[in-house]
Image (cartoon, rainbow, N blue to C red):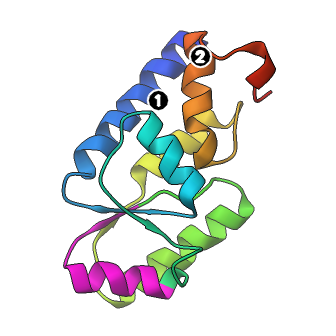
Amino acid sequence: MDDAERLERIREALDRLSELSEDHIILVEGMKDVDSLKHVGIDGDFFCVQSSGGPLKAAEHAWRAKKPVVIMTDWDRRGGNLAETLRENLESLCVRYDDSVRRDLAVLCRPYAKDVESVDAVVLLLEGRLPPSERIL
């Protein structure tokens, strides 16, 4: 896949995330993830799992809010483990979740980045708008 196609598919995934954000809670690891997603136009109800008490607190928050969630943890080993723990906690409370955007972005961004906080930089890089001093490669 060339960079133009990769960029188009990343934008499609981000559009899906934007639609989901209208009525879902977006579970991220930390504030840098929130900043990156906001930079690419995602707004919504974010919950920072690491700084807000962990996966169980995230699941309880969603259960109390009566809202489904989008799991948007990093696609490195630690983020994968956290996503698995989140799925288990959410399922135990019968909270619906979507992790398809995370899965798609993991494949599409992997050559350039391993985390959510770099999604905005990947988009800028593929658009040719990232200054050489800020390149993530």
Residue highlighted by disc 2? 126
Instruction: Identify the residue shown where x is 50% and y is 20%.
Output: 7
Q: Residue at x 59, y 74 (%)?
A: 50
Report which quarter residue 134 is drawn in. Answer: top right
Tell me the kind of residue under disc 1.
Ile
Left or right: residue 128 versus residue 94 is: right
- Residue receiving disc 1: 10
Residue found 62% across the figure and 30% down from its top: 121
Between 115 and 85, which is closer to the camera in this rendering? 115
Observer able to see residue 102:
yes
Distance between the Cα atoms at labels 2 and 1? 10 Å
The C terminus, quarter of image: top right
Q: Is residue 95 above or below residue 120?
A: below
In the image, the segment drawn in magenta is 56-70
Residue 69, percent from left and from top = 33, 66
Secondary structure beneath label 1: helix
